[in-house]
Every structure is written in C-alpha cells, then in structure tokens.
Image (cartoon, grey):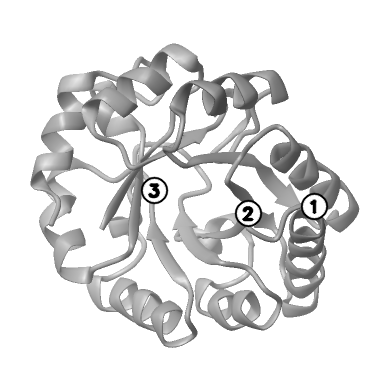
C-alpha cells in the first residue's frame, strides 16, 4: 500500500518526501477538496522530487469535459505523473463517461505513460454526484488508471462516516477485478489506519491528519513518518 500526501508548495512536498510519502500530490485546499494548484508549483515539485511520482489535482469539476480536458493537459505538461480530476457535480453515467473519456484522451495523447485518476466522493449523496459504485466500470471502459474516493465537503467528517467497511472493501475489490489501481482518501485519521490496512486499497491519500488535524495548517514530517509506520 502506498502513501499519497498532498502538499500545497515545494517546502511541504519536501517534508512529505522526507517523511516517507510514496506519491507527492500537489493540490490547493483553498479551491476545494481537489483544488488545483499552479503549473509552476507542479513543475517545481516535479523537478525537486526526481523519480518520486508526482500527482496533481485539477479540481472538483462539474460537467465541463472541455474545461476538464484542458486542465488535465496542463497538469500533464507541467510534469504530473498522475493527473487527478474529481467528478464533483457530475450526476449521470452519461456525464461521467463524457468527462472520463475526454480527460483520458487529453492526457494519453500527450504522454501514454501518464496515469489518469478519477475521483468520486464518499459523501456523494450530499453533493448530488454520481454514486461511487458506478465509477470503476466507467474508468476501466474508458482508459483511466486509478479510481479514487474522497470527501467533497471538508468539514472534518471522514470517508468512514459515509461508507461502511464493507462498502469500502467492495469498492476496492471492484477496482481490482477491473484491473484498476484503487485509492481511498477523505479526512482519513490515524484511528482509521487499522481498518484501511484490512480493506487493502493500493493507495491512501492524506493531508489533514499529517497537518495535526487541520488541512489548512502545515504538513509535519514526524506525523508523516508516524502514519507511514502504521501502514502495511
């Protein structure tokens, strides 16, 4: 299981790397759950990280496949190895297919080796977005590499407050059955790690818990190290 940590700048990226993060995920919490950062920040982090994979979020996107595709290309050109989009206000299967198909084409036409991450939301019911169970088949059919879940509203409630352990396990199993990489994020706390280890996603994504509980604070290396040591 790999640890993805989400810094907002180069200094935090170095802290996450030194703490043992496997993937450095550049984002901007001021713009939402998967808020996009600037191209030059992505580029500076990629240049500093060497062979360590860098992910970049492009936003909590509503149904705008053209906008999402252009943003995805920008992240890829800026150096991101993983390009992540959240289907925040995407409400139907048809809309999700349109988004995934065109984001994947935008990234893969530029560089087939780059990976596309499609994120849904554990709290999809309260943000009126597509149910998570629908995403793995769409991702597999239209060429995405990773299917992820996060929380859309960052009010301190975790993925575990919206999904049962059984539902989380089913999500991971569905992804694996379809040949996808599975990822779980969404206000994951230290006390959730034992359950995460049992559920067995390929990647867990965190920020708040390694900032001392406040995602708007600063990543602390000792907390990254502690969390990394708890993972199987």
Residue in view at x 78 percent, y 37 percent: 74
Q: Earlier in the sequence, mark 1 or mark 3?
A: 1
When asked about the image quadrant of residue 60, the answer is: top right
User: Of helix, strand and loop, which one carries label 2?
Assistant: loop
Seen at 56% across and 73% down, the residue is 131
Q: Which residue is mark 2?
A: 114
Answer with left or right where residue 148 lies relative to residue 113.
Answer: left
Dots 3, 2 in contact, CB < 8 A: no
Residue 106 at what x, y percent from top left?
82, 56
Residue 110: numbered disc: 1
Residue 197 position in % (x across, y down)? 16, 62
Depicted 33 relative to depicted 216: above or below: below
Which mark's residue is nearer the viewer, 1 or 3?
A: 1
Look at mark 3 in the image and give the residue it sits on: 186
Contact flag, marks 2 and 1 (Cβ < 8 Å): yes
What distance separates the C-alpha of mark 3 from that of mark 2?
24 Å
């Amino acid at each position: 299981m790999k640890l993805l940590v989400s810094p907002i700048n180069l200094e935090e990226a170095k802290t996450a790397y030194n703490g043992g993060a496997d993937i450095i995920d550049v984002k901007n919490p001021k713009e939402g759950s998967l808020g996009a950062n600037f191209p030059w920040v992505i580029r500076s982090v990629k240049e500093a990280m060497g062979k360590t994979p860098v992910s970049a979020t492009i936003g909590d996107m509503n149904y705008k496949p053209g906008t999402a595709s252009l943003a995805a290309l920008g992240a890829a050109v800026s150096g991101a190895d993983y390009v992540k989009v959240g289907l925040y206000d995407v409400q139907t299967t048809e809309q999700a297919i349109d988004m995934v198909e065109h984001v994947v084409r935008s990234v893969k036409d530029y560089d087939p080796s780059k990976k596309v991450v499609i994120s849904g939301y554990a709290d999809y019911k309260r943000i009126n977005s597509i149910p998570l169970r629908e995403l793995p088949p769409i991702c597999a059919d239209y060429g995405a590499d990773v299917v992820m879940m996060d929380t859309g509203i960052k009010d301190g409630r975790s993925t575990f407050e919206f999904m049962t352990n059984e539902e989380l396990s089913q999500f991971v199993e569905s992804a694996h059955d379809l040949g996808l990489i599975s990822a779980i994020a969404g206000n994951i706390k230290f006390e959730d790690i034992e359950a995460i280890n049992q559920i067995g996603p390929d990647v867990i994504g965190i920020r708040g818990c390694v900032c001392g509980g406040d995602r708007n604070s600063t990543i602390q290396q000792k907390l990254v190290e502690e969390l990394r040591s708890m993972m199987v």
